Amino acid sequence: MTHRPALGADPLANHQTLQTLLDTAPPGKLELPAGQHVLADGLRVPGGWTLTGVSSAETWLVTEARTGHPVLHVLGSDVAISDLGLRPAPSDPGEHGGDRGTGLTVGEYLYRSEPEWIDGVDVRRVHVDHRSLRTANGVGVMGAVRDVSLHDVTVTGGYTGLAVHWGAAGADVSSITGPTVHPNRLTVTGLRVRDAIEGFYLSSVHDVRVTGACLRDVEMGFRLLPGDNTDRFVSSSEDVGARIEVSDVCVRWSGPRYAVRVAGWGRSEVDGVVSVLAYRDVTVRDCRLIGSGTGDSWSPVLFEQAAGVEMSGIEVSTTGPAECRCPLGHP
């Protein structure tokens, strides 16, 4: 069933109309018209729904409440989102609030108990606009999430354009008891990030492919990280740190430390123990890094205890042309 709800100038009424539909109607297709639709708060998206607009330049969802709820929070499987612009209200979720204040979050970071997995999420032609805000991420893929595709996603402003992070059961990051859950079977193509602190990061994941990204005017291009607890609390069914490919990424950066960081060690906030993740079949290749650091000590690439990661075809230029060689249509 296709739903085309009428939206108006009242943010509270708009939010109530859309959230009630998502909560009570049988899952179907929600088509949003062109225009800037202001919502009192973000929307929770259950499983089975397709949300679409006219285009990411014509259909905008804008939140006004500073609760930190994502504009769209996907909490169920088999969801498709396309052709939308998302503008979150300003928020400051803090160091461990990577799934908060975003334009779009799939999954969660912390859970009350062992979570159900979210499978089969497809995101295409979505633009998250944080403007000059630098305190929240653009898109978050967190925790028990797998079989996710993101294609032609644009993020303007914000802290990290795309944050992919493990999750766990626990009240906070210092009281995790496990099991931890790790995003996997994730494909990202055509990511475009501009005027953010960082383009993207992958923290404690497996079976992930990122290709064809354009990261412009950022302080950091991307990071490959083991997570605070590496794989100490993982279940036996996980294969953290295996089969990750990052390729064909262009970075135009000017930050204090590095354009790319690949790290294998992590310090747990539960007990302070340092452990090292054993990466397997991980490649970072055919990347172009343009720019230089602003701090006293900087490097285009920072490589830390990351045996098992192969890097090749990395082109570094401190005085390269003003533009990345990115596919047509990138910002």
Image (cartoon, rainbow, N blue to C red):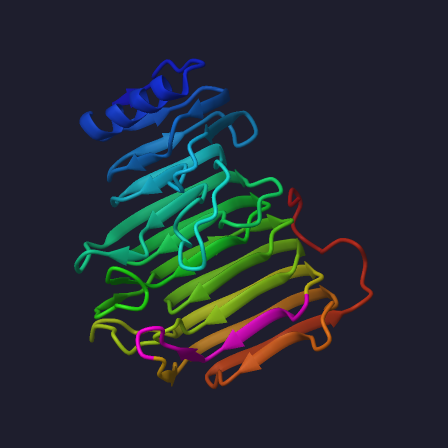
Q: In this view of the protein, which residue sits in the foreground, 76 or 187?
A: 76
Instruction: State whether residue 180 is above or below residue 81.
Output: below
Relative to residue 267, is residue 77 drawn left or right? left
Does residue 36 lie above or below 271 as drawn?
above
* Vertical order, 113 against 271 (above or below): above
Q: Which residue is depicted at the point 59% across and 46% down?
A: 157
Choose between 279 and 36: the one closer to the eye.
36
Residue lying at 57% horizontally and 80% vertically, measured from the top left? 303
- Magenta highlight range: 256-271
Let me know if residue 60 appears in the view.
yes
* Quadrant position of residue 219: bottom right
Q: Give the image location of residue 108, x and y in percent.
A: 31, 52
Q: Position of residue 14 (x, y in %)?
A: 37, 20
Q: Is 55 in the magenta?
A: no
* Left or right: residue 86 compared with residue 72: right
Instruction: Give 268 or 146, whichever is nearer the viewer.
Output: 268
- Magenta-span inclusion, residue 269: yes
Look at the image and tell me in which quarter the C terminus lies: top right
| Quarter of the N terminus within the rendering | top left
- Which residue shows up at 45% across the image and 14% down it? 9
Q: Residue at x 58, y 44 (%)?
A: 133
Q: Position of residue 148 (x, y in %)?
A: 36, 52
Q: Is residue 125 left or right of residue 142?
A: right
Q: How many marks?
A: 0
Find residue 286 and report its image quarter: bottom right
Q: Is residue 26 visible?
A: no
Residue 4 shown left or right of residue 199 in the figure: left
Residue 298 point in image, percent of width and height: 69, 75
